[in-house]
Amino acid sequence: MTHKLDFLVYILGILLMQHSLARPPDEQDYYHQELVSRDHYYSYPDPEEVQTPLEPEEEEAPPDPMVEVIHESQDTREDIYPVKKKETIKPKKMNVKEGKPQKPAKNSSKKAEKNKKTSEKSVFGTGEEKTTQDVRESCPPLGLETLKVTDFQFHASTVKRYGLGAHRGRLNIQAGVNENDLYDGAWCAGRSDLQQWLEVDARRLTKFTGVITQGRNSLWLSDWVTSFRVMVSNDSHSWVFAKNQTGDLFFPGNSEKEIPVLNEFLEPLVGRYIRINPRSWYEEGSICMRMEILGCPLPDPNNYYYRRNELTTSDNLDFRHHNYKEMRQLMKVVNEMCPNITRVYNIGRSHEGLKLYAMEMSDNPGEHEVGEPEFRYMAGAHGNEVLGRELLLLLMQFLCQEYLAGNRRIKHLITNTRLHFLPSVNPDGYEKAAELGSELGGWSLGRWTADGIDINNNFPDLNSLLWESEDRPRNMRRVPNNHIPIPDWYQYENATVAIETRALITWMEKIPFVLGGNLQGGELVVSYPFDMVRSPWKTQEYTGTPDDHVFRWLAYSYASTHRHMTDSSRRPCHTEDFNKEEGSVNGASWHTVAGSINDFSYLHTNCFEISIYLDCDKYPHESELAEQWENNRESLIVFMEQVHRGIKGIVRDIHGRSIGNAVISVEGISHDIRTASDGDYWRLLNPGEYAVTARAEGFTPSTKNCAVGYEMGATRCDFILAKSNLARIREIMERFGKQPVSMSMRRRRVRVRQSRHT
């Protein structure tokens, strides 16, 4: 009897446990559910495992005499596709050039073409023609590429190794140089059979409307999936397949590894989990893929994960992508709203003839004021990195609105600084990337100019000239440590220099910029110069400037005020973990680049410039712009305020006249700057005591001790230079109509007299 009671208690316990596990997933703690109700992430299922749908399968219909079973030839991994016997329907070919799937999609944020009558033919389905209303709902990406979906939300049937785990199956993720490490370029299944799958947990009930796929990012291997099935679930155990009139729906995959392919569902699929089941793949490769899921989370105010990640903005700004005409119109609207502090101008034209528009914000727009520093932001040197472009347009609107509202901080910034914003350095590349939109352009479409040049690395290599001069002191080709002249070969008409680059150089030489930032994308880090390694035959080596301590502070000032850049818990975008450097990196220690805009700006002008990489996603979806603005708004303002660090002043002669092109040297720092044409200068320095010297041709040098404090605001350090004795002699001789005699000429005359005397 006792044994029977024990057995009944045991059975009752099992039933209660099953009942608790059968509760809806949202009623349990997520991590408890992960541990109890799921298989291990790297578990290897049985090859014969069969997926069980939630609904009972319909009885198999009798075979249609008009339909025959067709198998793909020369591939044992194919599935069976029913096709009309008389009129065989083949899968529609993708436009490889533009990366479009069955039907072109111009912009992923505008993928739905509502109420459009189409004659629907299933790609792998029936041959029956039906004219229906194609009303497809379009949802934004869940955030696989932007890292909003965490690594814990990915699961897979099998994996080859950790570096090719499910968490690497993100759209546009890039592999490292050494691919057999922790950071590879896709999810790859551990086996090549039809039972493999990649799964994403949305953590709440979601309406899925489409999926975008890519192959594996690799220099050496070719792996991609050519067709797949899609299924959804509420509990990750029972699955419902996407179907059409004939049964399970098979979606066309990729025809190469880099061009994204969009597949939109005929009807939305609702569930918490979505799973991709590859059915065929490139015959010389294996099952590997990257993807993005399109989905709309359904309203659920009780969902903790939704509330935790929810971010709203109170700023009334235009959060959308702007093409060239819309960008120009927006800048015009801002100018009309704040005509007293703004000016729109252009610095030149692109290869296709589009004007490179810039906006100036100052209390006296259009003129350089003595004692007022010049600052610049530029974006879009790579046309497909569009987040910087939109952030600058948002920044223009924000500064104008806050100035009108009387924001003291913004009014002080605009009154005491001359700000310049160039939102689109490469408008031709942007227009090319915008044709396909935020998810379909891939990693590089639109990166280069219309004539195929990378603007960011198209500047003259002045580093080599400087280092050669320093390494060979007796070399006749001595170059200064500042304002190094541009080599003659670079100015030839047939030199490989973009017209946009020449326009930038002219702009940089015309305006005495003190500080600048160029906004880029594809990573989340701030990079500071030098960008080129000094040691030959090395591709990575820390190579700091003489002002390395200043650049490190400038980079940290942006990174530390960004919402995520210094977050130690965030995962790397691709292969590099920049958290150890607090969100900043020396450019040369990351990857060496000759002729970068940062190095050129430092060596040819007074401007200290850094590169700000804003997000893992180069071209975020329109729905992400408000959050990206919140992530970067404070950083953008704080970095502009750094232009007021260090020392400032005016160099004059004893009569009060300004001295242009005077050299300002700081003891212990082998990099000088020069005064503007009206004699004023700004020298960025960290807090401390400095011995500063001003010198100019024909004047006696003057040295002062200048202290830089921790409070914001540059220390005033003016110089009055007296003319040198030689300059005075020359003036006297010119006054009496005699030509001044140089010292070398005097020595030559003395030698002639001595030779005659002997």
Image (spheres, rainbow, N blue to C red):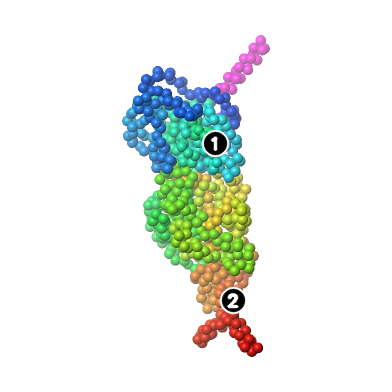
Measured along the vertical axis of the image, is residue 256 above or below residue 553? Answer: above
Tell me if residue 5 is in the magenta stretch.
Answer: yes
Q: Residue furthest bottom?
A: 757
Measured along the vertical axis of the image, is residue 658 above or below residue 334? Answer: below
Q: Residue 503 versus residue 721: which sits nearer the camera? A: 503
Tell me if residue 73 is in the magenta stretch.
Answer: no
Measured along the vertical axis of the image, is residue 82 above or below residue 679? Answer: above
Query: In which quarter of the view is residue 588 placed?
Result: bottom right
User: For numbered disc 1, what is the local secondary structure?
Assistant: strand
Measured from the top left, where is residue 91 in percent x and y?
Answer: 41, 32
Query: In which quarter of the view is residue 703 placed?
Result: bottom right
Q: Are marks 1 and 2 in contact (CB under 8 Å)?
A: no
User: For numbered disc 2, what is the local secondary structure?
Assistant: loop
Q: Residue at x 54, y 83 (%)?
A: 740
Q: Residue 124 versus residue 273: which sits nearer the camera? A: 124
Q: Which residues are magenta?
A: 1-21
Q: Residue 112 versus residue 9: which sits nearer the camera? A: 112
Q: Amino acid at mark 2?
A: Thr
- Nearer the N terminus, badge 1 or badge 2? 1
Dot 2: within a 10 Å radius of its alpha carbon, few (fewer than 14), some, or many (20 or more) residues? some
Q: Which residue is mark 1?
A: 187
Can you say which quadrant of the picture contains the C terminus? bottom right
Q: Residue at x 47, y 65 (%)?
A: 510
- The main secondary structure of the magenta stretch is helix
Q: Which residue is mark 2?
A: 700
The Cα atoms of the two marked residues, 1 and 2, are separated by: 68 Å
